[in-house]
Amino acid sequence: MTRRIDLKRIHTAHFGTMRAINRQIVLNYVRDRGPISRAEIARRTELQRSTISEIVDSLLEEGLIEEVGSGQSTGGRCPTLLALRANGAAAVGIDIAPTHTTVAASDLAGRVLEREVFETTRDFDKTISRAASAARRLAALSPGLISGVGVSLPGLVNPSTGKLIYVPYFNWRDLDVSRPIAAATGLKVAVDNDANAAALAELWFGRGEVGEARDFVMVFISEGVGTGIIFDGQIYRGEGGAAGEFGHMIIGERAPVPCSCGGYDCWEAFASGRAAVARYAALGGPRQLSFARLIDRALGGETAARKALLETAHYLGRGISNLVVGFSPEIVVVGGRITRAWELVSGVLEEAVMRSVRRDLPPARITPSTIGEEASLMGALSLVLADKFAPVAAI
Ligand SMILES: [Zn+2]
């Protein structure tokens, strides 16, 4: 693939670049194919044995990988096998969702080891200080092993400043997220919105078919609708981190609920969990019900709940169809609680994708999130973990 050289980023091509690239290659072989021997890595990569030994030594020293016993001998000594370090935590993630906040510590493979959950309150300082002290407690359980804290928020965020720009659900504006958490934990803090973070988690910790796709779109359904765009194997953030606000694209008129921006024509107002609950209420269901409970009732076979969910899925599909026509992604990943009802809604969503096929575009695959219902928590953890495995910026 040819890419125009970006002269603003040419300082990345320093002396150590080749070594850094080789290091990432070896680390990712251990991550994806481990347990694996040094000889096997050499055979697959054609890197010199001495280069691999040197890199493996430094990865062992940094605690990213470990020796996990011996493999089968092909004559001579049994080779020592290498795998990602499995003991102790490597990252702390804070997922601030509209109803509750989850703080969790995970190992290098993204397995959650410990968690703390509390109700998110409208009081920003209260929510952040509680999250920060939970993060400090979890980090203290694996002293010296945690390299950072990732924070996922349901709104507009500027990842380069660590500040939130606007979180409509709580009407939070222009607030510093990373500073109080960094001060409490002494760790580096990375902040992003929930859909971008979930897309990153799919890329690094999702099933192979998604992780190997260079271009995909993550549609994240919660109280709102968010999209994360993975372009050429990385998050496409746009200027100031504001790309992907497709929740506000115009889908119709007179939605069942107002969008978080106040409009009644936005995708979010038609396809979010809130929209589904409002449809259910219009059919006689209770007004005060969580989207998760509505899904339970639909799965239990309750007619009105099924109807509300399927109508919501229809509008979800409409928006996805627009994204497919505009982006032609390999895959559209749908994340959030709706994935639990995939069997019920997938037919409606597939129909939407067929609309682009009729326009002779390559068919995009549509798939439920492969990292489960907790996509935004996995996303928060990935903001720290992906950094460890990502290659150095290419020029
Ligand atoms: Zn809107």
Image (cartoon, rainbow, N blue to C red):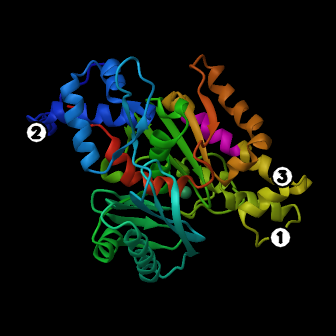
Q: In terms of secondary structure, where does tag 3 sit? A: helix
**Alpha carbon of mark 2 to alpha carbon of mark 3: how far?**
55 Å
Q: Magenta residues, as a range?
A: 315-323
Main structural element of the magenta stretch: helix, strand or loop?
helix
Closer-to-camera residue (133/214) = 133
- Residue 133 location (% of width, % of height): 41, 78
Q: Is residue 313 left or right of residue 36?
A: right
Residue 286: assigned label: 1
Q: Earlier in the sequence, mark 3 or mark 1?
A: 1
Q: Residues within 10 Å of mark 1 (few under 14, many from 20)?
A: few
Disc 3 C-beta below 8 A from ligand 1: no
Closer-to-camera residue (68/109) = 68
| Residue 366, picture quadrant | top right
> Three-letter amino acid code at disc 3?
Leu
Q: In terms of secondary structure, where does tag 2 sit? A: helix
Q: Is residue 238 visible?
A: no
Closer-to-camera residue (236/207) = 207
Instruction: Please give the residue where the numbered disc 3 appears in the rendered image.
Output: 299
Q: Is residue 240 left or right of residue 250?
A: left
Q: Is residue 62 left or right of residue 364?
A: left
Q: Residues within 10 Å of mark 3 (few under 14, many from 20)?
A: some
| Residue 278, picture quadrant | bottom right
Instruction: Please give the residue where the numbered disc 2 appears in the rendered image.
Output: 11
**Alpha carbon of mark 1 to alpha carbon of mark 2: how far?**
59 Å
Residue 190 drawn above or below residue 322: below
- Residue 338 location (% of width, % of height): 69, 50
